[in-house]
Amino acid sequence: MYNVQFPGIGISMTIDPAAFSIGGFKIYWYGIVIGIGFVLALIFALRNLRRFGIKADGFIDCVITGLICGIIGARLFYVIFRWEYYSQHLDELFAIHNGGLAIYGGVIGALTGGCIVAKIKKLPIPAVLDVTMMGFLIGQGIGRWGNFFNQEAFGTPTDLPWRMVSENTGGAGVHPCFLYESLWCLLGFVLLWLVSRRFHKYDGQIFLLYLVWYGLERMIVEGLRTDSLYTPLFGLRVSQVIAAVTALTGIVLLIVFRKRTFKAADAFAAEAASGISGAEPSSDEADAPTAEKDPPAEQKDETENNSEADS
């Protein structure tokens, strides 16, 4: 149980990380919030697949694989960079209900697993990445509130009006970093959705914009956090390094591909139109009796002459 306050704006509340219990087994808000984010992201993606020229059945396989690989990747990433602790607490390796999921590990794992399945299913991978990254922003924007319920992922002390205070912050007002990232991701979703509707020139464009948008935010917000994972060399924050590399990569590739215009949705629409125009007649049409035609003029004249001779 945590007593959480935002003294600068007069908000105070008590939160319990556990939502409820079933037979002594606790269900935590952390998992519920992440689950809600995932479901909303999936609903958005499924409703927009056709617009990106993606078949739904193959995409579902990508999602299932990506989900599993994402959870594994997020936990593995976190444990690797906290191995000094987990090597002495092996019983906590799978205790993800207490937090300890690294977002970049989850993204890398989900994209790797999902892209492999997309390749197998012969789906347009750049288009899959586009719709997936918008879904990611929904999931990240909502899922970050799981950190709020666990009172983690906060930043350094601050006197800003929206500072957060709880037992986990040691009674000091700190940056609510989970809130910064949540708002940034939800704003990013709105912007990329607008781009996808009006300025989408080629498959992969939305994915590259995601790399830039999220990378820039993560470079800034990660610098405020007190629970960052660090590289073994030079003492650099892992997420800041990855964010810088991905943002720079996204900027460079956006420039390189600026003249591209190919979209799988266009090819999908053209194929569908071709299939309609060249469609075979239905079985009902094929089996329907044809109207009896008048005999050719020559045959008609000959018949009339024979009739006159008989008469």
Image: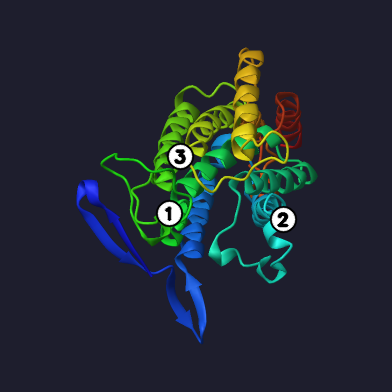
Residue under label 1:
145
At a point 69% along the width and 33% down the height, the residue shown is 234
At a point 56% along the width and 31% down the height, the residue shown is 215
Q: Position of residue 239 (x, y in %)?
A: 60, 39
Mark 3, Cα crowd under 10 Å, few <14 / some 14-19 / many 20+, is many
Amino acid at the residue labelled 3: Cys
The answer to whether 190 is drawn above or below residue 111 in the figure is above
Contact check, label 3 and label 2, Cβ < 8 Å: no
At a point 73% along the width and 36% down the height, the residue shown is 233
Q: Earlier in the sequence, mark 3 or mark 2?
A: 2
Residue under label 3:
185
- The image quadrant that residue 298 belongs to is top right
Q: Position of residue 191 (x, y in %)?
A: 43, 30
Is 69 situated left or right of 199 in this image?
Answer: right
Q: Position of residue 223 (x, y in %)?
A: 51, 36
At a point 61% along the width and 38% down the height, the residue shown is 237
Q: CA distance from mark 1 to mark 2?
A: 26 Å
Q: Secondary structure at mark 1?
A: helix
Amino acid at the residue labelled 1: Trp
Q: CA distance from mark 3 to mark 1?
A: 12 Å
Q: Which numbered disc covers residue 83?
A: 2
Q: Earlier in the sequence, mark 3 or mark 1?
A: 1
Q: Position of residue 289 (x, y in %)?
A: 66, 48
Amino acid at the residue labelled 2: Trp
Contact check, label 3 and label 1, Cβ < 8 Å: no
Q: Nearer the viewer, mark 3 or mark 2?
A: 2
Q: CA distance from mark 3 to mark 2?
A: 29 Å
